[in-house]
Image (cartoon, rainbow, N blue to C red):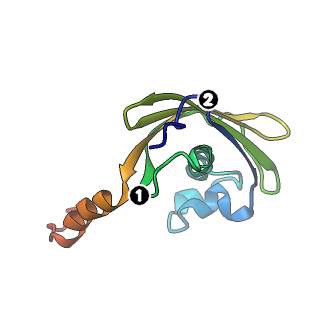
């Protein structure tokens, strides 16, 4: 981590919601989701918030580092239909070792859509992949249903 990784870093992301990011498209194999209204899915909203936080970190990590989302505490207060632009603001509010906490909010033209916090952990990319390989090459018993 560079010394510049300090509270106060911020980013903004303007995202025009395509139809493919609405609830029926979240898990198309689920009849439950398929029957829901065509508004921005909470699952995609979380991804857009994470993207905004990652943008705030650009240039403040070492080449061998990345961040992973480890905690999400977000409201989803208003529906955003396809074609609307969602504006997300993220500010790094705390750095505790390798744990980074962001305060986030998002709005569209009509309402506050989201407020909350998101935590990310700084990882060493190669060390993470090495640990992951031990999990993916070890046979696991089938998951009983």
Q: Secondary structure at mark 1?
A: loop
Give percent across and percent down for residue 82: 78, 56
Q: Does 90 appear above or below 25?
A: above
- The residue lying toward the viewer, choosing from 133 and 64, is 64
Instruction: Classify the position of the C terminus by image quarter.
Output: bottom left
Q: CA distance from mark 1 to mark 2?
A: 23 Å
Judging by the rendered image, the residue that carries numbered circle 1 is 64
Q: Is residue 110 left or right of residue 26?
A: right
Give percent across and percent down for residue 42: 59, 47
Q: Residues within 10 Å of mark 2 (few under 14, many from 20)?
A: few
Give percent across and percent down for residue 132: 27, 62
- The residue lying toward the viewer, choosing from 104 and 4, is 4
Q: Is residue 2 left or right of residue 40?
A: left
Visible residue check, residue 12: yes
Visible residue check, residue 34: no
Instruction: Classify the position of the N terminus by image quarter.
Output: top left
Mark 1 or mark 2: name the one nearer the start of the chain: 2
The answer to which quarter of the image holds residue 49 is: top right
- The residue lying toward the viewer, choosing from 145 and 94, is 94
Q: In the displayed orientation, state which residue is furthest to the right.
A: 109
Residue at 19% across / 65% down in the picture? 134
Q: Which mark is residue 8?
A: 2
Q: Are marks 1 and 2 in contact (CB under 8 Å)?
A: no
Residue at 46% across / 51% down in the picture? 62
Q: Does 118 appear above or below 128?
A: above
Q: In the displayed orientation, state which residue is furthest to the front.
A: 3
Q: Secondary structure at mark 2?
A: loop
Q: Residues within 10 Å of mark 1 (few under 14, many from 20)?
A: few
């Amino acid at each position: 981590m560079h010394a510049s990784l300090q509270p106060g870093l911020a980013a903004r992301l303007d995202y025009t919601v395509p139809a493919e990011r609405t609830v029926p498209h979240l898990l198309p194999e689920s009849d439950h989701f398929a029957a829901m209204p065509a508004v921005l899915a909470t699952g995609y909203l979380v991804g857009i918030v994470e993207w905004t936080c990652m943008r705030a970190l650009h240039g403040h990590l070492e080449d061998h580092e990345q961040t992973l989302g480890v905690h999400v505490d977000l409201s989803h207060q208003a529906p955003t239909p396809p074609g609307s632009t969602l504006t997300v603001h993220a500010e790094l509010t705390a750095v505790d070792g390798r744990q980074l906490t962001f305060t986030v909010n998002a709005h569209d033209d009509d309402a506050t859509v989201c407020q909350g916090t998101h935590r990310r952990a700084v990882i060493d990319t190669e060390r993470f992949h090495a640990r992951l390989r031990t999990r993916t090459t070890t046979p696991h018993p089938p998951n009983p249903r």
